[in-house]
Amino acid sequence: MQNVMDETNRGFMDRRAANHIPLTPLSFIARIAAIYPDREAVVYHDRRYSWQQTYERCVKLADALIKAGLKKGEVVTIMCPNTPEMVEAHFGVAMAGGVLNTMNTRLDTDTISYILDHAETRFLLTDTAFSDQMAKALAQADNNQITVIDIIDKFDEESRDGARLGALDYEAFIATGSADYDWQMPEDEWDAMALNYTSGTSGKPKGVVYHHRGAYLMAMGTIPDWGLPRHPRYLYIVPLFHCNGWGHAWMMAIVAGTIICCRKIAADNIFNLIKAHKVTHFGGAPIVLSLLVNAPEEVRFTPDWPVQVMTAGAPPPAAILEKVEAMGLTVTQVYGLTETYGHLSHCAWNEDWDGLDFTEQARIKARQGVNMAHTEAIQVLDQETSEHVPWDGETMGEVMFRSNCIMKGYHKNPDATEEALGEGYFKSGDLAVCHPNGYIEIKDRLKDIIISGGENISSVEVEGVLYRFPGVAFAAVVAKPDEKWGETPCAFLEMKAGETATQEEVIAFCREHLAGFKCPKTVMFTEIPKTSTGKLQKFKLRALLDS
Amino acid sequence: MQNVMDETNRGFMDRRAANHIPLTPLSFIARIAAIYPDREAVVYHDRRYSWQQTYERCVKLADALIKAGLKKGEVVTIMCPNTPEMVEAHFGVAMAGGVLNTMNTRLDTDTISYILDHAETRFLLTDTAFSDQMAKALAQADNNQITVIDIIDKFDEESRDGARLGALDYEAFIATGSADYDWQMPEDEWDAMALNYTSGTSGKPKGVVYHHRGAYLMAMGTIPDWGLPRHPRYLYIVPLFHCNGWGHAWMMAIVAGTIICCRKIAADNIFNLIKAHKVTHFGGAPIVLSLLVNAPEEVRFTPDWPVQVMTAGAPPPAAILEKVEAMGLTVTQVYGLTETYGHLSHCAWNEDWDGLDFTEQARIKARQGVNMAHTEAIQVLDQETSEHVPWDGETMGEVMFRSNCIMKGYHKNPDATEEALGEGYFKSGDLAVCHPNGYIEIKDRLKDIIISGGENISSVEVEGVLYRFPGVAFAAVVAKPDEKWGETPCAFLEMKAGETATQEEVIAFCREHLAGFKCPKTVMFTEIPKTSTGKLQKFKLRALLDS
């Protein structure tokens, strides 16, 4: 439709250098280093960098990459826990026009070499703690254009003792760059900035491409919803290789926060860091919260200041929530996927719920909630009608997102991109219900639903019952092909050390708590394969059933 | 330069509906009304609207405008103090695809009719307190396509008694719209959203056009720098007709704040509202702060909770700052222009200054500071060399901005647009120095500088001395053409009631405090013309000298 005002002014009101600047997190660090040059930016043991120093190290990294031959849009892969180098790579690589590919440090050789090839990695920054694994992957990869830079962490024994794979280490490499390098803004905010491979719960990892605009808006939009103040003291537990650490490094460069690096995810280390650095904010999966509440008494520490915790990956169980909050930590659940830069929804708290009893509060906090400021819409659409499911807290549909913080697409994979993004929404593959107040609650992965005799069975519901069976450590339910029913639920159980059970006992227990058709027909006792972030790999269990 | 990653994925990673949504503040209100439907959004006397109600009233306004014939990009003018209608217009007009033109309620008839013609106003929402003035302006305007809607404020005597100019009042008008109207997002975030005429300190007002993207980023970017928490209680003193009230209505729709409307800018009213509504944040010119500290004892109120105040328009004088902060209000100075949606810079506080004595703190707080999160760069460029001035706190240059929160241009004025935006920066027309820490401090308007015998004289510096002369209420110094010196300073003084002085006394006083060439050669005693926001209109004084 014609726009009267803009037609009138046609020809002289286009975007210009003065009034249209590509949105990018690089603007954040340039600004904050100028305003708060001496404020502490990154801390790791006795390594302490101010924002000015961090900025300069990022610029030097960028210049070093350019001098060593990096071209615009080429990939720099980093395999590194949360150390200062990892934070710096999140700015420096983009300052050189490169695309940052963070790699999960627990990946297997095959996957690493697959990614090095698929990403066409040009530079590899790799912590020497992982040298054995990485050397094998490099030998296996077809890619022979990789320049390797070693990151040596003097505070980590494995890193200190690890083999050197490259000609230069990180410090020597950035010393070849100049802090005066005139780094370049992206030409277009839609330019690729990061490449994150999916964790592979369902086979070959896909390369998710992030753009600068999304990274900017994700960082900016999280601030109001988390109520983030100026100068937070942020403990970086969430691995930066996981959705770029939910964008929180970029966000800290908006509010001039201090990033405290957490390499070792162990209760004593985390409590020590919280205490020593007066941490005010951190993020972590429920498994991290579980670590904290199950830590021995002498390790635990209850801060006498408020601490905000963001959790994601799974709903925090009520029992853990209760203990965590008793420690003075306020937990907010957020939800998102690799394709969405991390969190797009959050369980926004409503003061009306302050008076509810703890059980009810925990039930609410287990929900994934509503769209964050950087997300235009979350829909839960019926699989068949493509209509929004009723807000009844019962009817399941697929969660769909529309947001500026959704990937450009899957690297070199137009078909999967079209499938994920082609219908106006990003299809999450997660099944949820929508409660009467509009809060969504994830019930299952779409591919984990079991259809038996025409009835949908939520594997999550069955697993919920199985977890209540005495001695169960992990439970996973997948569909087993069945001539009569199409599919039937098959339960895999990993028992706690020293605990045993029989198939008959388990099925009998399920019959007490579930409709008959939902009860597993088969129960197998085995160690359940998990990803590095602790997600159960159901596709491997399905493969067991097929073989 | 070619981008390797984006070339590889050419053809299937373009912007799509799923991952590219135009940035607009309309997204804020839609989201927050869904999450916090029952939270208080707007309060004015006994009128209290929740976010759901406010949202619905905005949608109804949009639908009513569409039904009454508004076309995309046409102008809706509003002449209204800070009441709920004014807040609603800030969302509802854009929801209809219209462009909101807010009009200063103190404008003269000539200027009002000029704007109605120049903006090609299609709808006029006008508070009946201003009916006399508006009726004259309408009669005088050539524009005969205006549909007038009256806003009747039952809490304001003048409004209650004012003549009706339209066939419908606001409530009847929005009742013709439906809350179910499927309002439209802008097609492009660069679409015009608002039209704000400059205040006319230098002649004919120019029509500044804002785009949706800037409005979004302004609101979002102010949050981290102001440290705005969730659910602030915001007293709206800054007129919404002034740079759309610095974008704060839009911002409140991000954080689910409560807007308390302040129609009458008087000390007793402001103190009463702060007390009654437990206000946590407000903005206002230093003249508002002055009102508060000079209020009679029995009117004053010192809140026992923290209150954050944003001030702009002029540096807050130390004496006022001291008294305001003693009341428990924390003041931050921000700086911007109509062309920049309001504040682009702020005097960001640094904890290192906490230990300074009050005088030194006040000196710092009088500076305009550094770029806010939504501003890419502020430069202070030498007029002749176009180089950045030294960071010495002494050398003056023109302030230049680069930001996503800069206007598209001046409506129907390509020449002025090119002059303001054509060189990569927006030229502010303000002269500033840059302190060693990079904080800027405005010294004068470019056109107010006086060049006498080749020497630059800052009118602000001379006025600073004149304000210290006993009995002076207002002082303005402008250039007087002079055959010998080119220009000489001419002082206009408005004395306080009952106070008098002679030219000789004033000049003698100046000689004690200023270099000889900076002293006024002429002193005139007169009432100084001011804009509705209290700015002295030097162009009218210059006209006096020319005539």
Image (cartoon, coloured by chain):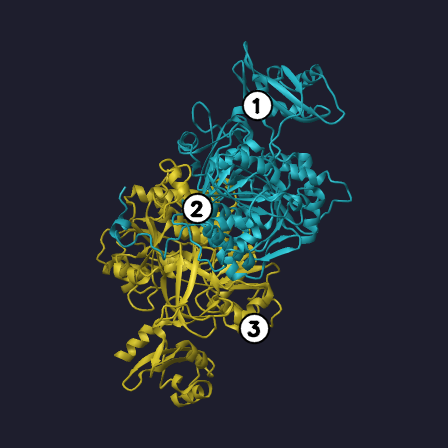
Chain colours: A yellow, B cyan
| Nearer the observer, B273 or A329 | B273
Determine crowd level at label 2: few under 14, some 14-19, many 20+ residues with C-alpha closer than 10 A. many
Q: Looking at numbered disc 1 in the image, what kind of residue is underneath it?
A: Ser
Q: Which mark is residue B458?
A: 1
Q: Which mark is residue A360?
A: 3
Q: Is residue B268 left or right of residue A474?
A: right
Residue A26, given in percent of the width and then of the height, sits at 41, 45
Secondary-structure class at tag 3: helix
In the picture as drawn, the residue positioned furthest to the right comes out as: B298
Secondary-structure class at tag 1: loop
Q: Quadrant of residue B313?
A: top right
Q: Looking at numbered disc 2 in the image, what kind of residue is underneath it?
A: Arg
Q: Which residue is mark 2?
A: B213
| Nearer the observer, A526 or B28 | B28
Count of marks overlaid on the render: 3
**Which of label 2 and label 3 is nearer to you?**
2
Q: Quadrant of residue A400?
A: bottom left
Secondary-structure class at tag 2: helix
Residue B147, given in percent of the width and then of the height, sits at 51, 44
The span from disc 2 to disc 3 (Cα, nearest Å) is 40 Å
Q: Do discs 2 and 3 belong to a common subunit?
A: no
In the picture as drawn, the residue positioned furthest to the top comes out as: B484
Check whether the beta carbons of the residues at disc 2 and disc 3 lie within 8 A of each other. no
Q: Looking at numbered disc 3 in the image, what kind of residue is underneath it?
A: Glu
Look at the image and tell me whether residue B199 can be seen.
Answer: no
Going from N to C along the chain, the mark reached first, 1 or 2, is 2
| Nearer the observer, B298 or A225 | B298
Check whether the beta carbons of the residues at disc 1 and disc 3 lie within 8 A of each other. no
The quarter of the image holding the C terminus of chain B is top right
